[in-house]
Image: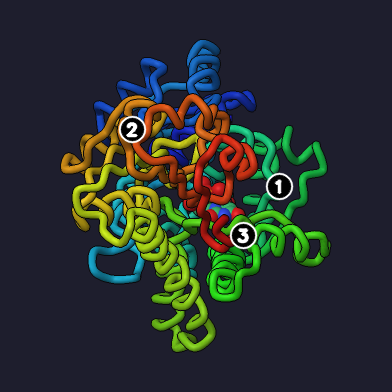
Amino acid sequence: MKISVIGCGYLGAVHAASMAELGHDVVGIEVDAAKAALLAGGRAPFYEPGFEDLLGRSLASGRLRFSPDIADAAGCAVHFLCVGTPQKRGEYAADLRYVEAATESLLAVLEPGQLVVGKSTVPVGTAGRLAELVGEKVPGAMLAWNPEFLREGYAVQDTLHPDRLVYGLPSGPDGDVARARLDEVYASIVATDTPLVLTDYATAEMVKTAANSFLATKISFINAMAELCEATGADVKQLADAIGHDDRIGRKFLNAGLGFGGGCLPKDIRAFMARAGELGADQALTFLREVDNINMRRRIRMVELAREVCDGSLLGKRVAVLGAAFKPDSDDIRDSPALNVAAMLQLQGATVQVTDPAAGENIRRSWPQLMVVDTPEEAADRADAVLLLTEWRQYLELDPVAFGALVSSRKVLDGRNALDRERWVAAGWSYRALGRRSD
Ligand code: UDX
């Protein structure tokens, strides 16, 4: 099938290459000509394990190309909308300008019988509005909403082997046509008995925001428990293990620490609250404000803990920060808790040396005031405290004995409850973590 993917950021680039992998003839439309050229040359504009291989394979197959010109989307049976919906500056609401601009430009090439498929995370009600616009400007063209649940670091796997497919479909005969078209797009996935949810636009839009809100709530729940553990001397890691044994709760997403960040969870819960307000249902989501507050408080607590272990003052202290991306296996520093903490430490007078296996370039570009070094060893040079803020595997595998020879004081703060406490303590380190007793 001929498919266009409009917007080749994180979501769109992975989606375009994945659709070519599934056997479709795909054109990725990216208005940033430099980015389109980079992708066409087989280079990923972001760090994502497995993506460059997939991109290379898809380009070599001749089934994938990229273009900055929407005219190249003409004649496609399906047009995926994959543009970003960032948080508006100074507001909670989502900024829909890219979705609107992409739809507007698509109308120029859209033909009757073609299907527009929204994948971006949007405020509930957006799909209905866009469907009206599409129907009015190009009678006979259709729209469906098919949210994407990919996680950074697992984007390729999540796209090719999703947990579920959700189709938000128009009512009436168009719904049947749209469903059949999407089934054809995802034929090899549908054949694997992947759960398929057929629903209306509003439910499909809400599935995405509800899922992200639930995940954020689960993280903030365990982080609230961590606050209580700190007040009582209990251990949040053991607590999470114990409650996680209950199948109804589950252990996943109960890792207490610095909390959530990135380009999705924080802005999605805020946009959800804003939309609920517009709909007169804000009370239903006031708990998400607390979810957000708990999340932000962890960062402040981490800075307090660092100050505590540095004998009450960060002024003039050398602090090594291991990890700056919002999570491992990503170079994404959007709303990164780690970077936020590093910046706060520096503001309080510490000399902060940040290292990250993938995000270094992004930090140098966006946070030139922070000192970035290439290796954990350089970061640890004469450090008064070492902070693990993003749990990259290579940091978990560091040898605490050899590492201890580099620092001026063996104090480690585990912001992700991810280090092997016993190993570090055995190597003579004082180990502190969020939600756990100090030794
Ligand atoms: C998320 C959703 O998981 C995905 O389905 C959606 O499509 C986009 O948003 P992503 O932002 O890539 O994906 O990261 P995710 O793995 O969900 O982690 C989000 C944040 O939560 C990270 O900062 C991570 O460090 C943090 N987290 C996760 C915790 O603090 N504790 C946990 O137990 C799990």
Instruction: Tell me where residue 51 appears, x and y as whole percent.
Output: 51, 26
Which mark is first along the chain, 3 or 2?
3
Instruction: Tell me where residue 122 appears, x and y as whole percent.
Output: 45, 61
Q: Which mark is residue 36?
A: none
Front disc: 1 or 2: 2
Residue located 41% across and 45% down the image: 387
Which mark is first along the chain, 2 or 1?
1
Quadrant position of residue 437: bottom right
Quadrant position of residue 208: bottom right
Q: Quadrant of the N terminus?
A: top right
Query: Which residue position holds label 1?
Result: 163
Quadrant position of residue 399: top right
Q: Residues within 10 Å of mark 1 (few under 14, many from 20)?
A: few
Q: Which mark is residue 169?
A: 3
Residue located 41% across and 51% down the image: 263
Q: Disc 2 marks which amino acid?
A: Ala
Q: Quadrant of the C terminus?
A: bottom right
Query: Which residue position holds label 2?
Result: 379
Foreground of the two, 418 or 189 = 418
Q: Residues within 10 Å of mark 3 (few under 14, many from 20)?
A: many
Q: Disc 3 marks which amino acid?
A: Leu
Q: Disc 1 marks which amino acid?
A: Asp
